[in-house]
Amino acid sequence: MQVGVVARDLQGDRGRYIRGLAQGLLELRSPDRFHFYYNDPYEMVGNGGSWDGRIGDKRLVGPRWWWDHVALPTIARRDRVDALLCTQGGFPLVSARCPVFPIVHSIESHWDRMWLRVAQKRGAFFIVYSKGPFDQLIGMDVGLDKILWTNIAIDEEVCRVTAQDELDRVVEKYALPGKFILVSAANDNVLKVIRAYATVRRSHGLEWSLVIAGDFGVNREGWQLEIGASGVGRDILGTGDVDEKDWPALYSLADVFVSTDESGSLGFPLLEAMACGCPVVCSPLEYRNVTGVAGERVEPSEVADIARGIKEVLRDSSLRDDMRLRGHERVDECTWNRVAKETMRFLTEVVSR
């Protein structure tokens, strides 16, 4: 089978998903051929040229509308593509003469809904990896036979850091305390996590500090005011920008990673934390989409419930050990190889209808 993959707009977590899926597809070592269509050279997934005769990288140039709706379907027809994977907003208006599979990351704006409606009317099939978009597509009367719900995954190289010199380097670089709770500055619920930590620290006397990893950005003033008013500000610290290579050591050093994200983000940090042996406290959305029984589920809108989850995990070392074990089991289920196999199974089934 000839499979076209749109490899553009690869920034952030969405790009990470496309890259991971593409790598998983290539590692299947199947007889299928893959065509990767990109705009900028840094977006190349197959490293250019061909590999075992199975990869074709093609750079398409021009304005976005031309790229999506004219150049892409034209080259896909020329390549005799049997199935075309594209981004959710990049569904081509000109026919590619093959089934098209938008990868749906989130459905938040009127623009998102409009393009998905267009894709639905033109017979598209959809790939999702979280419950929110799945439920929304069902609400749009998209049939179950037209949706693949798969998972996200992380690279196998992400694992617990045990080298003491590497741990010492990260501790010194970010001035980390001996025992700490970790939260990412990219999380949309940091203010409530600060309040929950203050509750736990004052009411239960737990000795852990709170580390907010990453740049505060536009939230700096509001978060600093909240930290100052918490009464435990000396036990809360920010790291500033964190180098990508330092995250595994941060997860490995932390006693618990608190996410409680409500935005429907992809959940890569949760998988990485579990891969590094760090217990996680998460929202019901993240529990369903990412962690399963490996996470401690809390209500993200309730400071008291976030505090409860943090306290229960920190006060019970046997629970933390059990969460680490379940976390590793969950991570073992989330591989790009598995995502690629499920995707190819769906594509094959659709093309053979």
Image (tube, grey):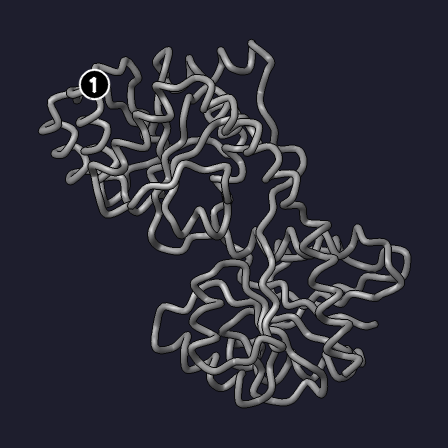
339 sits left or right of 257 in the view? right
Give the residue at x 51% y 67%.
Answer: 104
Determine which quarter of the picture holds residue 161.
top right
- Residue corresponding to mark 1: 204
Residue 315 vs 138, above or below: the answer is above
| Side (left or right) of 39 relative to 142 | right
Task: Name the residue located 40 percent from the left edge and 26 percent from the top edge.
Answer: 256
Residue 191 relative to residue 248: left or right = left
Q: Position of residue 303 (x, y in %)?
A: 21, 39
* Residue 54 placement (x, y as % from top left): 85, 62
The answer to whether residue 326 is above or below residue 164 is below
Residue 266 % position (x, y): 48, 52
Q: Position of residue 35 (x, y in %)?
A: 75, 67
The answer to which of 33 and 140 lies nearer the viewer is: 140
**Quadrant position of the C terminus in the picture:** bottom right
Quarter-of-image position of residue 308: top left
* Residue at (53, 36) in percent of width and height: 272
Residue 255 against residue 24 in the figure, above or below: above
The quarter in which the N terminus is drawn is: bottom right
Secondary structure at badge 1 equals helix
Report the number of numbered marks: 1
Q: Which of the two residues, 285 or 168, is positioned nearer the viewer here?
A: 285
Q: Nearer the viewer, residue 195 or 229?
A: 195
Q: Residue at x 40, y 31 (%)?
A: 257
Q: Which amino acid type is shown beneath numbered disc 1?
A: His
Q: Is residue 335 left or right of residue 305?
A: right
Name the residue nearer the viewer: 210 or 135.
135
Q: Residues within 10 Å of mark 1 (few under 14, many from 20)?
A: few
